[in-house]
Amino acid sequence: MSNANANAMIEVSNVVKVYKRGKTEVRALNGVSLSVPRGQFLSVMGSSGSGKSTMLNLLGALDVPTSGTLRIDGKEISRFPDDELSRFRRDRLGFIFQFFNLLPTLTAVENVILPELLAGKSRELLEPKAIALLEQFGLKGRGAHRPDELSGGEMQRVAVARALLSEPALLLADEPTGNLDSKTGSEVLRLIREATRARQLTVVMVTHDPKAAEVGDRLVRLADGNIIGDDAVQAAA
Amino acid sequence: MWSLLRFVSFRHVFQSPLRSLLTLVGVAVGVATLVGIAAINRSVMDAFRSTIDTVAGKADLTVAAETSGFSEDLLETVRATPGVLHAAGGLSVVAPVNNSPGESLYIMGVDLLDDGYFRTYEGAGETNVGKLADDLEFLNSTDRILVSERFARAKNLGVGGIIELQTHEGARPFVIHGLLKETGPLKAFGGSVGVMFFGSLQEAFGKGRTLTRIDVAIDQQVGLEAMKERLQKAVGASIEVDSPDKRGSAVTTMVRSFQLGLNLGSGVALLVGVFLVYNTVSISVVQRRREIGTLRALGATRRRIRVLFALEAAVFGLLGSLLGMPLGVLVGKAAIGSVANSVSEIYVRVNINDVKLGSSELILGLTLGVLGSVFAALRPAWIASGVQPVEALRKDAAIGAGAVEVKAWPTWVGLGLLIFAWPVAQIPPPLENFPAFGYTAIFFILMGITLLSPIVLRWLNVPFQRPGELLFGISGRLAADNFARAPVRTAVPVSALSIGVTMAVTVGAFIGSFQASADKWIEQAIPADLFVTSSARLAGTQNQPMKAEVEAELLAAGNGNIEALNPVRLMAHDVLGLRVFVISLDSSIHEKLGSTMILEGKIPTPEERAKGYVTVSENFSRRRDLKVGSTFVMKTPTGEHTYTVGTIIIDYTSDQGSVILDRSIFKEQFKTDQVDTFHVYLKDKSKLEETRNAITAKLGKQYDLYVLSNDELRQEAKKLVGGAFAITYAMETVAVALALLGIINTLLAAVLDRTREIGLLRAVGADRGHVLKLFTGEAFFIGLTGSLFGVATGGVVGFIVTNIVGVQATGWNFPYAYPWMTAVQMILIGTVSAIIAGLYPARRAARLDVVEALAYE
């Protein structure tokens, strides 16, 4: 598993992450190694404090490990400077958050194209693409609405569209259904599953909902900064 | 309550030290400006009053004709009046010190024998004042002078030392005959005082046999009023009889609007400081919603919450004011020179060595600092007390913070204030030279704009989106959006900046409009090629009048290139309660070579002039409601004369007004032929420099001459006006600087409120540059909006100041010109400095840790 695998989207090797909280040190990840092949949907579960958020932050290039190596899409990103990390996130990664995290002043379409606008691409080229994507996700005619005019499920669909627009190599989802009722949650999950499968996209989803975790191909369990379980999911949703 | 303040409030103060510091600095600078200016104004008036008071000594009544003087024979008349116990006559001159530009000596001419009753002179060192009355050398020489120790020390001279002073005959040496301690009358005029025997002074300064003052001690049994009446009857109506404390009221009135303007300018600085308190307390309320909810859940009453926030503001106000006091001394010391200079140049000579903060200024600063701060906290405190206990439980209490709803009432009140501003501005001033309602209208406009700005800001994001995106890319677009997200909060720095810019544009409009008119006036009405003045660049309050014979000397010095010379006298004189300038000139030359700008009537013919027809300035006619054909009375050394207004002209010699008399009539009625400035018309204008050099070479040193070309005179006039407003530039700078603190304050709060959003942006690929641009972009929009509001408001306020306040204060009604250059400059300065102010919060935002930012609640 620790061997560099040409087919792996993610190669985590011996990663340690230590946080300083006041005067005490917290070892959030304790020498974790993990390899995720391209196209796999990986669910990560664990109780609060298990290290799953830290893991997601590292995979999402939001943070760098204290030690160990972290290779995503063939790039060793653990020593990237801040600006290169930003660019990497912009170009290669897609994010879905629990609280949707849409910018309140932008319309749905604008929220979707935001990462690409940040990359300096032209709005005129992006907008038709975003509108098509939103239609595909059942949000026809909602593109000009602002987040406060959308329901929770709609907002999360917009977030999914945003994550997928730039055709990332890796999609990271942090409790994507945590703020939705169960019916809407499972609809959003199904949407993510279908959209990523069609694109052969690698997905890492952190959740504490066992039902949500079953959507994936594989389930990794974390506790106290260590992997305590790594299994294939039996029945795909 | 105190424990809440200690445990809750003060911890917040220390947790956001920068914001607390900015607020303190804001209050302190505002209070310092207010206190400093108040102290300067008082010092200027004190200096002026103390000269009157110390010189008046123990006199019960003073018979005075300060500006024009009267015959010394009157002294006997006064002495012969029943009920007069003692009377002492005297005169005084302010003599420029040679080779020491701007410095002068206040010389009292007294009869030491009589004078001792009213004033005590104390000799210093060897000087024995008691013996001076018999000291023939002192009494018989025209060049013997006693000076204050302070003056001698400053000049490094002792008894026997020589001091050169400018007289009507040019520079003359005076021998220091003795030194006097700086007590009693020697404290007048900032201690730069000399004493001469009055006869010697008359002789040395060409005053003929005139006095300007007779001090009188009366029989108290007769009573002050009765004696006043008796004396007035004895000396005739042309001379004032009054108690010393009544004297100088013309000057007090004259300086009033100037001082009021300064006070209001400093008030604006404090207002902007108070805005900062409002800003800080509002931000604090929004960010502490959950804490307030918790306090409420734990049993704190609404009233308690209100009092808590009001107290917090009071503490800010108190500390800021205390910090502002010593700063105020610095402000006073830094600016007193400039103000005293302007007052001396425009109104009356004052000599000030120091400015001290008195208890009245301290109380004023402390009261306004604390009350202003508490007032600023009222609304946020009210909002805080409306927080429900349940908000303690809301996890996202801080999210969307700052987005206080734009309420309808401020908009209506704002509109109301704007609508009322105009009619209020039209109300006549309650006191001479006190345009209170004009200033009230300006306050209405400033507050109206402030109250309206939140709603305008909310609309502005749409028009700003495109330019934002063009300038800063997607960050600029987001900046435009964010700019309108918390309009109530953003409105504070926007309004503060706009007030600073408004001030600049208003002053620019007034000065510009005045200068344009004055320039045109000099060009048309007095197109002389050279202006020759002694001891000062401009004739008026600072120069030394020259003897009439200088005319012949000038003609001779001019190498035959002088076509005409007009000897002009500008004599400050109290007429109808105003200290106007009585201008005397040779009418035939003036009318031939210049073209008087007539508003009404026609220039009196020589026959009409002989019958008392005169020309008056527009402002004098307006201030005293004189029309063509109106008559008025002027007191002169030859008695009271009645004059008829023949024509009203534009004349910018004095903001108090001018009365123009032909020189022959003036000489006859005022018994003086001295000249303040010669207007020189040349035959060959191309030889201007040669002629000027010739005059300077032959007479320059002797008379301490300043020979200015027409161009230079105009420049000088501009400088004079610019100088009078110099301190307002400093106050504008203070207002803008405080507004910038407000921008920092507001953006720091925005960074806190939007931390999670920043995290999100960073997560989806924004680099630090994007975040930096986002916040500097927001600062740019705040700066741009504030500047645009300011140049627009400044246009209106400038109009009111020029056409209403200015007319009430000066009587001049010159056409209003919008100061485009100033407006463009202020937009640039306002916007660029806002961006610079935004850099710090922007960098803080850009440096946020992404993971922590995402997890921020």
Image (cartoon, rainbow, N blue to C red):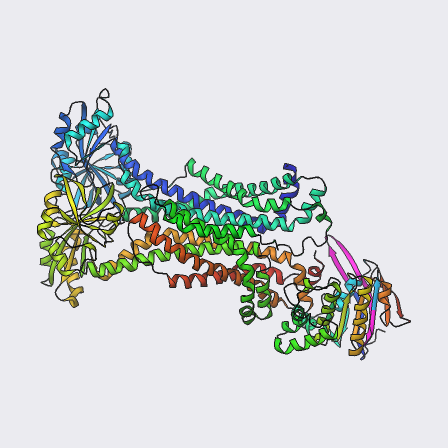
Verify whether residue B617 appears in magenta.
Answer: no
Residue B354 as seen in the image, left or right of residue B100: right
Q: Does residue B740 appear in this view?
A: no
Residue B350 as seen in the image, left or right of residue A5: left
Question: Which residue sits at x=79%, y=60%?
Answer: A28
Question: Total of numbered circles in the picture?
Answer: 0
Indicate the quadrant where residue A35 lies.
bottom right
Question: Which residue sits at x=56%, y=52%?
Answer: B408
Of the pair A44 and B615, the residue shown nearer to us: B615
Give residue B13's position: percent from left, percent from top: 61, 46
Give residue B513's position: percent from left, percent from top: 32, 58
Of the pair A81 and B336, the residue shown nearer to us: B336
Give residue B169's position: percent from left, percent from top: 13, 48
Question: Which residue sits at x=41%, y=57%?
Answer: B794
Specify the quadrant that holds the C terminus of chain B: bottom right
Provide the residue span drawn in magenta: A16-42
Verify whether residue A28 appears in magenta.
Answer: yes
Residue farthest along the right direction in this orientation: A234
Q: Considering the whole magenta stretch, tell me its main secondary structure.
A: strand
Residue farthest along the bottom direction in this orientation: A6
Question: Which residue sits at x=55%, y=43%?
Answer: B316
Specify the quadrant that holds the N terminus of chain B: top right
Residue B563 as seen in the image, left or right of residue B282: left
Q: Does residue A100 appear in this view?
A: yes
Q: Is residue B467 above or below residue B428?
A: below
